[in-house]
Amino acid sequence: MNTAKAPVWRRPPVLAGALALVLILGVAVWAVFLREDDRDRYCADLVVLKGEMDTKQSDEATADEVYDSLSEQIATRADAAADFAENAPEETREDWKLYSERFQAFLQIMMDMGDYDLKKPAGWEKVFTDATSGAFAELSAEHQAELDDVVAQLTDEKVVAAFEAIESDAAEKCDVELDIKEEAPSGVVPQ
């Protein structure tokens, strides 16, 4: 009969602990690699967004081309903000969520006050037509107050801080120079 004890490293509790440690480390390493893949995707998406935001309209563009361009940029920005609010890295997800919520509120108030769908060229055409015809001057006090409130929320210090956090993260971790706050639609609607 063998009365020798197994070495400490071969005892069941030690083996179970070692196996658990290996599994935990494996999951942690796997999570880091997944997180890096998520960051890489996010950075690639930011590059695409920046390219679309940097698209400038020619001075010789027709009204229809301007309406197309504006609606495309608004739709791109709204879709990107909503996507990043769900899928951005944790460091900026809440900032994107705040921006997305405020931007969607702006788009919604535009729809509510005059069926101005800024994601479509016809919505922009209606904005410019109503702005030049004086229809904006005829907005109800309620709609004007709602619009003022939404525009103020879209440009308040919380949103500015969110813009700065997003831009800083993009520059530091993705090497992408965004300029979101310069592109904010604060002057979209004549007041």
Image (cartoon, helix red, strand yellow):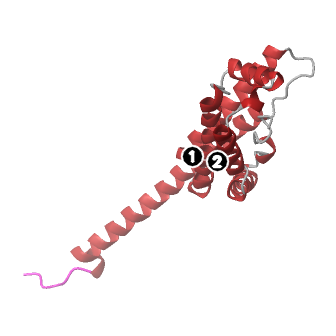
Q: Amino acid at mark 1?
A: Ala
Q: Quadrant of residue 65?
A: top right
Magenta highlight on residue 104: no
Residue in the image at 92% along x and 22% along y: 59
Q: Amino acid at mark 2?
A: Tyr
Q: Residue 132 location, x and y as percent?
A: 83, 23
Magenta range is 1-7
Residue occupied by mark 1: 85
Q: Residue 133 location, x and y as percent?
A: 81, 21
Which of pointers 1 and 2 indicates the residue nearer the eye? 2
Residue occupied by mark 2: 99
Magenta highlight on residue 6: yes
Q: Quadrant of residue 91?
A: bottom right
Taking the image as shown, residue 96 lies to the left or right of residue 174, namely left
Residue in the image at 64% along x and 43% along y: 146
Taking the image as shown, residue 87 lies to the left or right of residue 25, namely right
